[in-house]
Image: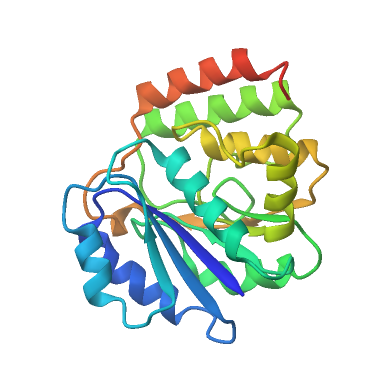
Amino acid sequence: MLYFLVPVFNEEGNLGVLIESITSAVPEYSKFYVFSDDGSTDNSILYIREHFKTDNYIILGDGNNHGPGIAFNTGFEWILNHSKDNTDKIITIEADNTSDIGILSKMLTISGLNYDIILASVYAQGGGFDQTSFIRKFVSSVAAIIMRYFFDIKVQTISSFYRVYSVDIIRKIKQKYNHVIEEKGFISVVEILIKAIRLKASIIEVPMLLYSKKRIGKSKMKVIRTSLDYIKFLFKSKAKF
């Protein structure tokens, strides 16, 4: 079983293309769709209910805005409680259509070679951005360099949402740390990666082009706030991990 875990926050304009792309992708697999709503105030939830044509989906969330980390953790917890097989896979992906669903088949094939996590990487050879600001790329690159140095991370991309996880590695993270994710913000995807690395997870990157032009509306990530989150995470987590 493939579980698609999609955090959603005011993505009404992007959900039509997203739903079409994830429901038509890799048709040879059985799929279940977990939408973890982070307190959307637009018609995102109504849109999912009206346009999702199957009953193999669920919408999670308490109606409040907590941050993507809480949305991810809520989704992971639900999947762990419902997955019946440790060979199940979890695909996490942005709701704004910036990730290339076309590489998912390749990611799943590589995952089948006993890798715990497959990262879609804009920094791997062959990956890149179609459009993004210099400051966003600069901050992302500097943050990645610092995190790789302090936490001995060997991969290039540490903050991408688009990943394939084995359910087994998520279960091991839960057992070791009690929570899959504790951070509320975008730093949460770095947190879970570090936890997996400390558990000796096998991780590999697949090059991806990030299609920012496909996004309707602005990115939800705030550069200054996220930069401060990286700094706070660095000081409070170095000893923990």
Q: Nearer the viewer, residue 18 or 30?
A: 30
Q: Nearer the viewer, residue 204 or 141?
A: 204
Q: Nearer the viewer, residue 54 or 153?
A: 54
Question: Against 172, is 48 above or below?
Answer: below
* Place of residue 69 in the rendered image (x, y in percent of width and height, measured from the top left): 47, 39
Q: Nearer the viewer, residue 177 or 233?
A: 177
In the shown orientation, is residue 200 left or right of residue 8?
Answer: right
Q: Residue at x 30, y 43 (%)?
A: 219
- In the rendered image, the quadrant that contains the C terminus is top right
As drawn, the residue found furthest toward the top would be: 235
Q: Residue at x 52, y 22 (%)?
A: 230
As drawn, the residue found furthest toward the left would be: 42
Q: Which quarter of the picture shows residue 178?
A: top right
Q: Residue at x 21, y 49 (%)?
A: 217
* Place of residue 36 in the rendered image (x, y in percent of width and height, measured from the top left): 40, 54
Q: Residue at x 42, y 54 (%)?
A: 94
Question: Against 106, is 160 above or below?
Answer: above
Colouring of the image = rainbow
- In the rendered image, the quadrant that contains the N terminus is bottom right
